[in-house]
Image (cartoon, rainbow, N blue to C red):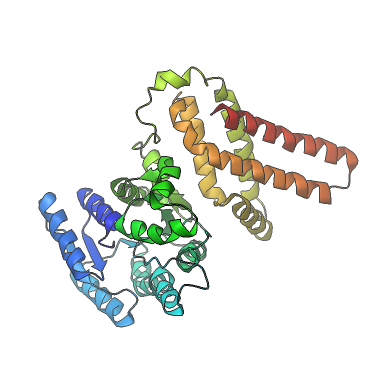
Amino acid sequence: MARGGGIGFEAARALTYLGAEVVIAEIDKVKGEQAQNVINRALHTERVSFVHTDIADDQQVQALYEHIKEKYSALDVIIHNATVTPMGAVDAVSVIDWDRSYAVNLRAPVLLTQKFLPWMKEKNSGTIVFVPSSGAAPYMGAYEVFKTAQVELCNTLAAELEETDIITYAIGPGLVKTETAQTALETVAPLMGMTLAAFYEMNGKHIISAEEAGAGFAVSVVNAEKYNGQEIGSIQALMDAGMFEGQDRSAAPGADSHDISFLAPHIQNVADVFNEQYNGWLTRNLFERQWVLRDFKKTVGMAADNFHMRIQSMAELAQNKRFYGLAEYKPWLGKLKEYYAHQYKLLQGYEKNPEALKKNSQVILGWMEELQTVIDGI
């Protein structure tokens, strides 16, 4: 199930191309019918259908459920892609818009999950995909608060479904120039003291196309088992599928790789250190594990599972001498350094043995120094 907008349309098209039967649940009848017809004509199929639905309306969701259950033997995948994007300062956005954002961006995923999950449980099969946003940002609160809550909803659901074969994960599309995003940013950019053009120019290296974002959604579904319980991004899904090598695609691998080839062992060291930490966290008791993982996510801004996969992908790029793709990881390496600095500060407060304090402090400082070498090099 996908919304009939830019990313939703591309996700629906990619999934249809891969052989899926797709139901588009869309509030805009014109967009929904157009998406259905365009995809079916382009791919010479009739496997895409449109159901006119306001997913914030309980009765319409019930009608959608009855339609799908009558027409299909199972629902294999739900993608909670629909969104509304009220923008402005917390005290400037009307309560009506806050309520609408809650209804679409959080309540609707809960409602749809409640409706279809029992059917998935009957068959012990299915994939539920949440589509959150990146986190708190000024003048985007009425949107971000409910979209980021989808991550915790996903985490809760994943824990409840551990003993089943039902998969759930969250995937962020990234910064995409869709009509919805453009309209939202026309409000936000001036509040941040810049023009819309300046905003896009500042974030140019991070922008991906709707086609890339939608394809990322589709290939993440194909590799869903790999992402169970995690928060990922479209770029990561594409990279894991070997379909994306970084924004600077025009750069010749040989041009820069020779200059920074010395980084390969340093990158491997960074990956080895984090992998050892990550694996150690997973062996802790439930309470300690949850505390450590929450602390990591709070400091870094990404779930440890997701970060672990990014570090692995970065190490693979270095091993294969594809250094031109490493720039994408620089901000996250900076976040990891911040986390190690946080660990260093905590250590000073709880380690009472002077020798152990000195030894462990030197270890953490060594991690930070190695990270800085990589950050400076790329």
Residue 161 visible in the shown view: no
The residue closer to the viewer here, 190 or 51, is 190
Residue at image x 51%, y 58%? 135
Question: Is 339 located above or below residue 112 in the figure?
Answer: above
Which residue of the protein is positioned furthest toward the bottom in this rendering?
59
Question: Is 187 located above or below residue 57 in the figure?
Answer: above
Q: Quadrant of the N terminus?
A: bottom left
Residue at image x 28%, y 63%? 3
The residue closer to the viewer here, 91 or 279, is 91
Residue at image x 30%, y 57%? 179
Count numbered badges in the picture.
Answer: 0
| Rendered location of residue 131, percent (x, y) | 40, 59
| Rendered location of residue 353, percent (x, y) | 89, 44
| Rendered location of residue 290, percent (x, y) | 63, 58
The residue closer to the viewer here, 39 or 159, is 39
Residue at image x 68%, y 43%? 340
The quadrant in which residue 331 appears is top right
348 relative position to 116: left or right: right
The quadrant in which residue 253 appears is top left
371 relative position to 58: left or right: right
| Rendered location of residue 271, percent (x, y) | 58, 35
